[in-house]
């Protein structure tokens, strides 16, 4: 079981899926399925254009809305970008930062990840900061080296106060969208390693309190095993979050 001192978080990353109409339809099915949930945080990150519909649909509910990316400047001539303040004004409370698809397809590097995380915190958003190794890294025995480098250059570059306001997500690239979930033991070991990075960079207190989510092919039928790991505090779910019933099953996992 994850630590009883850390509140669990189940977050959905919809990626580039769901129009506004599809978003409204999802929430009319999903909200009744999770209406009784009070002991964990539920977050859904739709594409930018569906945020307003999601915020409207979840008003007064136990579901918070997040963005999937931000730029770190507050405003300016940055075509195509959105700031943390803009997301907060739109009703978001969270934002995903440093997802491997952003790193792989849009050039987000560790420096960008730390700047985005800092900007999110400054505007009152909770960043969900992602790290994770590729298959080649893992097979070459470089998992810890890569995680440590991504940690130090990204979330680990924040001040202790900033760091206390973020969530971490361990997302092994080889497990994302592939159906190859990390075994609970692999995920648990990576989470424990990340917690040790937090300890070394900051303090025993922050290492004990930071919440670390696991992401990569989380499904209703594997969440139970992952949940049993001591250092896992929740999940960041892609594909299985697009269906109201399957995401509710993950949220409702005891
Ligand atoms: P997946 O995606 O659950 O479809 O593997 C997870 C993620 O990319 O956050």
Image (tube, rainbow, N blue to C red):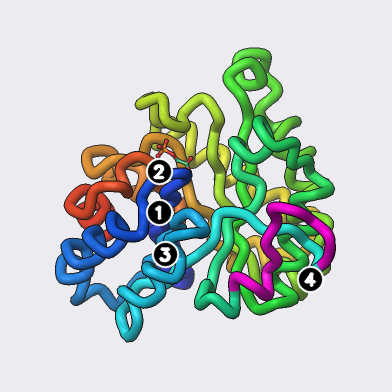
Distance from the alpha carbon under mark 3 to that under mark 4: 24 Å
Corner quadrant of residue 119: bottom right
Q: Earlier in the sequence, mark 1 or mark 2?
A: 1
Q: Which residue is mark 2?
A: 238
Between 20 and 44, the residue placed more toward the observer is: 20
Q: CA distance from mark 1 to mark 3?
A: 6 Å
Q: Who comes first in sequence, dot 1 or dot 4?
A: 1
Contact? badges 1 and 2 (CB < 8 Å): yes
Above/below status of 141 relative to 11:
above
**Quarter containing ligand 1?**
top left
Locate residue 2, reporting x and y percent. Answer: 41, 58
Residue extent of the magenta highlight:
76-87
Q: Which mark is residue 12?
A: 1
- Distance from Cα at disc 1 to Cα at disc 2: 6 Å
Q: Helix or strand or loop: what does disc 1 sit on? A: strand
Circle 4 residue: 74
| Left or right, residue 115 beside residue 13 | right
Q: Look at 16% across and 62% down and name the residue there.
A: 29
Circle 3 residue:
43
Mark 2 or 4, closer to the camera = 4
Task: Looking at the image, tell me whether mark 1 or mark 3 is earlier in sequence order.
Answer: 1
Relative depth, front residue between 24 and 13 = 24
Q: Is mark 2 within 8 Å of ligand 1?
A: yes
């Amino acid at each position: 079981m994850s630590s009883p001192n850390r509140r669990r978080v189940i977050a959905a990353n919809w990626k580039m899926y769901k129009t506004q109409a599809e978003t409204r339809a999802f929430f009319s099915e999903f909200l009744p399925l999770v209406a009784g949930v009070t002991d964990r945080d539920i977050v859904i990150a739709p594409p930018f254009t569906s945020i307003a519909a999601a915020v409207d649909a979840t008003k007064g509910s136990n579901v918070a809305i997040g963005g999937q990316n931000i730029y770190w400047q507050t405003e300016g001539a940055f075509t195509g970008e959105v700031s943390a303040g803009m997301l907060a004004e739109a009703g978001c409370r969270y934002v995903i930062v440093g997802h491997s698809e952003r790193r792989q397809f849009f050039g987000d590097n560790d420096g960008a990840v730390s700047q985005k995380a800092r900007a999110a915190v400054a505007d009152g958003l909770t960043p969900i900061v992602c790290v994770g190794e590729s298959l080649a890294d893992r097979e070459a025995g470089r998992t810890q080296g890569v995680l440590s480098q991504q940690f130090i250059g990204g979330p680990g570059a924040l001040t202790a106060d900033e760091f206390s306001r973020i969530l971490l997500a361990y997302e092994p690239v080889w497990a994302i969208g592939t159906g190859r979930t990390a075994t609970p033991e692999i995920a648990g070991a990576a989470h424990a390693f990340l917690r040790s990075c937090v300890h070394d960079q900051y303090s025993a207190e922050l290492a004990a309190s930071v919440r670390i989510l696991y992401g990569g092919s989380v499904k209703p039928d594997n969440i139970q095993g992952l949940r049993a790991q001591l250092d896992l505090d929740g999940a960041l779910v892609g594909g299985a979050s697009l269906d109201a019933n399957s995401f509710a099953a993950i949220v409702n996992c005891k």
